[in-house]
Image (cartoon, rainbow, N blue to C red):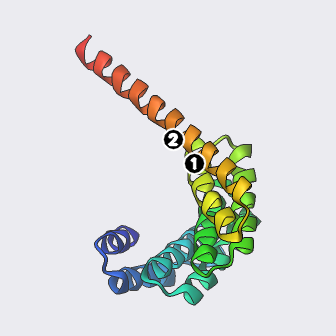
Amino acid sequence: LTVLARLNRTQGDMNMALVYFFNALDLLDEGHQRIQVAQLKYEIGKTYLQSGNLPLARSYLSAARQAHRAEDDKRPLIDTLLLLGELHLKQKEAAIAILQLENALDLANQIRDTGRQFQIYRLLSLAYEQKGYLLQALESYKRFHQLSEQISQQQVALEQEAIRDNYT
């Protein structure tokens, strides 16, 4: 059901995506399948965020954040904090967005997740700019750009290695 929900969301059919996500949520036992329930709440929050229903997005993403924090599940927690940061930016609540994103950055640094750091710095630069902290916005943008270059170089190296493996 979640695959169908994500497919519908990707195709822009948010209502059908929500139907599938809620059906999947109904099938889970919240007491025994907390991680899956938290992930579904994240997906529902993400769908509401993409459809512009910010109050419901906040509700589901906040519930997912609490569950991921309780399970000490860092990667999904970072993803949830990223979406909460994006939500607060859309609501012109830059200070709250900065708090969410700085928490996400601390976690991403702990697990050395370059891809997530990249996303966080992009949003942090926007949040700092929205708040009027231009120096911090510039520093975040520089770090975002550095990580972009690093990720590009890693992708090129992987592609070159794959080509070598295929032709040797």
Say whether marks 2 and 1 touch (CB < 8 Å).
Answer: yes
- Whether residue 33 is visible, yes or no, is no
Sooner in the amino-acid sequence: mark 2 or mark 1: 1
Tell me the quadrant of the picture where the C terminus can be found: top left
Q: Which residue is mark 1?
A: 118
- x and y percent of residue 104 in the render? 69, 58
Q: Is residue 135 above or below residue 168?
A: below
Residue 37's tag is none
The residue depicted at 31 percent of the width and 17 percent of the height is: 165
The residue depicted at 56 percent of the width and 54 percent of the height is: 119
Rounded to the nearest whole Å, what is the CA distance between mark 2 and mark 1?
7 Å
Q: In terms of image quadrants, where is residue 77?
A: bottom right
- x and y percent of residue 134 in the render? 70, 59
Amino acid under disc 2: Ser
Badge 2 element: helix
The residue depicted at 50 percent of the width and 72 percent of the height is: 43
Q: In terms of image quadrants, where is residue 2?
A: bottom left
Tell me the quadrant of the picture where the N terminus can be found: bottom left
Q: In terms of image quadrants, where is residue 35?
A: bottom right
Q: How many marks?
A: 2
- Whether residue 56 is visible, yes or no, is yes
Residue 148's tag is 2
Amino acid under disc 1: Phe
- x and y percent of residue 158 in the render? 40, 27
- x and y percent of residue 36 in the render? 56, 68
